[in-house]
Amino acid sequence: MTGADAAHIAMGIPMTLGLTAGAFAIGSVLGFPVMLARSTGFLPLRVAVIAVIAFVRALPPILWVFLIYFGLGSGLLNLSPFVAALSAFGLIAAVNMAEIYRGGMLSISSGQWEAARALNLSRVSTWTDIMIPQMTRVALPPSATYVIGLMKDSAIASTIGVTELAYRGKQMSQITFEGLSAFAVVGVCYIALSLPVAWIARTAEKKLRAKVAR
Amino acid sequence: MHRQWNLSVIDSPRPVVKLEHVSKRYGAFDVLKDINLSVLPGDVLAIIGPSGSGKSTLLRCINWLEPANSGIISVGDVTIRCEEVPEKSRLTALRRQLGMVFQSFNLFPHMTVLRNISLAQERTLGRSRKEADAISLNLLDRVGLADKAYQYPVRCSGGQQQRIAIARALALDPKVMLFDEPTSALDPELGLEVLAVMRELAGSGMTMIVVTHEMGFAENVSEHTMIMAEGEILEYGPSREVIRNPKTERARRFLRAVNDR
């Protein structure tokens, strides 16, 4: 395998990164309203959301990718492989981030809510000034773990033809008949992508912790 | 003639906090039974009694942290009929007049001490950051913690945190300060520094309602003392009278237990 072959595989990095970052962004944003609905006092909505979360998590990611690409994509909607994979992983990320956020919210003592109410802070201010900053601190480590897992799961998108790292590795192994070196390059690429994420998360957490640690 | 009428108003000022027939239940359990209470401006009222007597619940009903089931709660010119669900604006108007100090301080751990005190001033009173910080620093100086302004709360002792919490509540210019066992989470020495701040506050004419186990505070600082048990008011009157000569057997028993410690 030549350097050019390895470079061809590495060209899948933007696609893997785009899929991961896109799905994580969707999940981080949608996860918040899902968490709020999951925690609402209105019982029917809460039960419905709990059921949806359990359902989304119960099916393996590859099934969601197939359901959206071959299910919705055939006839109903015209979805490109990338958009289909992004939707599937965005959906999965949303319910998982909702649960991570909820863990963060549960870690905040009821006294914080009471203080916010006694100080007459509005609902928006209570969330943005008091709750979200404290939730973020608790949610950061599991979010970093999750985003790394999401990146590895994104290899599933290769099955519907998204030209990301795993797809290009398989392509190159079929061209060169050098499976071992082709997939070794793929592996190195994944490691190179996940190390900075882990490092950034750890540094950010340390910084936050140093400020308020007991 | 007109002047005389004015004087009579001064002679009998309107209560700033008034509870009429306030009751609260948790399921089948009556936490508060038909509570009637008036607190005049400048009054310092200590509420004492065994745990589970409903004294903290009573305090938390006044600012609607816990909704009462029936009765009428008035603070200043805001009146809440407890059977109805009060609209948001009315609750805001109610709480605008009330400062609250919690047993567990409840400072915001992710903000500096200064930010803890300034935040609500900016958000609810519309003060600028500069204005709010100036007021906060002034209050920190008043509670003896000017040097802590840029620290985080965890770097402060419990007594310091509670004094910061008092400053945070005062920063919103409340008419009445509510204290929910402010020294119960503190060791005796740290409790003293909080009590000193409260004593100074009482001396400045602030209206205060204090749920406490500190008999010294009740007897020497608060004008009136109320003893509660099983959701009812057993005794109410001038502090010395209530503590030295309680009329009911239940109150005598409680005070004996306190004095035997």
Image: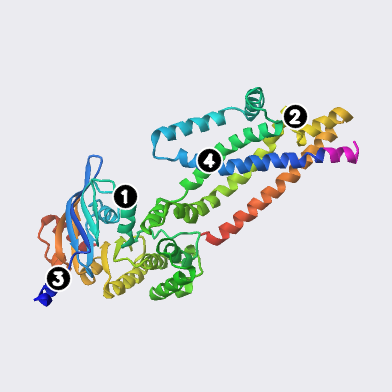
Give the residue displayed 87% in from the left and 37% down from the top: A5
Sequence-wise, the earlier of marks 1 and 3 is 3
Q: Label 3 lies in what chain?
A: B
Q: Position of residue B138 (x, y in %)?
A: 42, 75
Judged by depth in the image, the label closer to the viewer, 4 or 1, is: 1
Q: Spatial distance from mark 2 to mark 4, Cα to Cα?
A: 29 Å
- Kind of residue sitting beneath label 3: Val
Q: Which residue is mark 4?
A: A98
Q: Which residue is mark 2?
A: A161
Judge the density around disc 4: few (<14), some (14-19), many (≥20) Cα neighbours within 10 Å: many
Q: Which residue is mark 1?
A: B87
Q: Main secondary structure of the magenta part?
A: helix
Against A165, is B199 above or below? below
Q: Spatial distance from mark 4 to mark 1, Cα to Cα?
A: 30 Å
Judged by depth in the image, the label closer to the viewer, 2 or 3, is: 3
> Could you confirm whether marks 4 and 3 are on the same chain?
no
Residue B9 numbered mark, or none? 3
Magenta segment range? A1-8
Q: Is residue A186 left or right of residue B7?
A: right
Q: Is residue B36 left or right of residue A83?
A: left
Q: Label 1 lies in what chain?
A: B
Give the residue displayed 10% in from the left and 57% down from the top: B248
Query: Do tag 2 and tag 4 residues touch (Cβ < 8 Å)?
Result: no
- Kind of residue sitting beneath label 4: Ala
Q: Is residue A111 left or right of residue A165?
A: left
SS label for mark 2? loop
